[in-house]
Image (cartoon, rainbow, N blue to C red):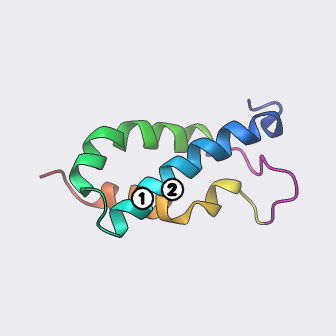
Amino acid sequence: MRKDPKQYSVDLNSLFNYFESLAIGVARGHYHAEIVRDQFEIILNGHVESVADIGNWSEGTTGTRDIEHFDKMIALLASWKVTTKH
């Protein structure tokens, strides 16, 4: 994936769109935050870390890293890092 991340752009965007929708659901109160955290924290963190050094994987995107387009997901993950589980 690191050699040619654009080859995986559909997969990466689908995966991170899914995580972004979970983060939006938590923010809007549609999903219970602690249940989402219990089920997805390790998975989400692992996937974000796996693309940390990859810049843009999509054609024609702006900015330095495509992962930054998923701001709700990144904010949710950051909030988990500063709080302890109940």
**Chief SS of the magenta region:** loop
Residues tagged 2 and 1 counted as in contact (Cβ below 8 A): yes
Q: Amino acid at mark 1?
A: Ala
> Against 60, is 54 above or below?
above
Q: In this view of the protein, which residue sits in the foreground, 41 or 25?
A: 25
Q: Can you name the residue that lies furthest to the bottom here?
A: 28
Q: Quadrant of the N terminus?
A: top right
* Residue at image coords 29%, 48%: 37
In the visual, does 58 lie left or right of 44? right
Q: Which residues are magenta?
A: 52-62
Q: Can you name the residue that lies furthest to the left here?
A: 86
* Residue at image coords 31%, 62%: 30
Q: Position of residue 22 (x, y in %)?
A: 42, 54
Residue 66: name its quadrant: bottom right
Residue 33: name its quadrant: bottom left
The residue that label 1 is drawn on is 23
Give neighbour class at mark 2: few <14, some 14-19, many 20+ (Cα, 10 Å).
many
The residue that label 2 is drawn on is 20
Is residue 38 covered in magenta? no
- Give residue 68's mark: none
Whether residue 78 is visible: no
Q: Position of residue 64 (x, y in %)?
A: 75, 61
Q: Position of residue 14 (x, y in %)?
A: 63, 44
Give neighbour class at mark 1: few <14, some 14-19, many 20+ (Cα, 10 Å).
many
Q: Amino acid at mark 2?
A: Glu
In the visual, does 2 lie left or right of 16? right
In the visual, does 73 lie left or right of 82? right
> What secondary structure is marked by label 1?
helix
In the visual, does 70 lie left or right of 45? right
Q: Can you name the residue that lies furthest to the front here?
A: 30
Q: Position of residue 52 (x, y in %)?
A: 61, 46
* Residue at image coords 49%, 49%: 19
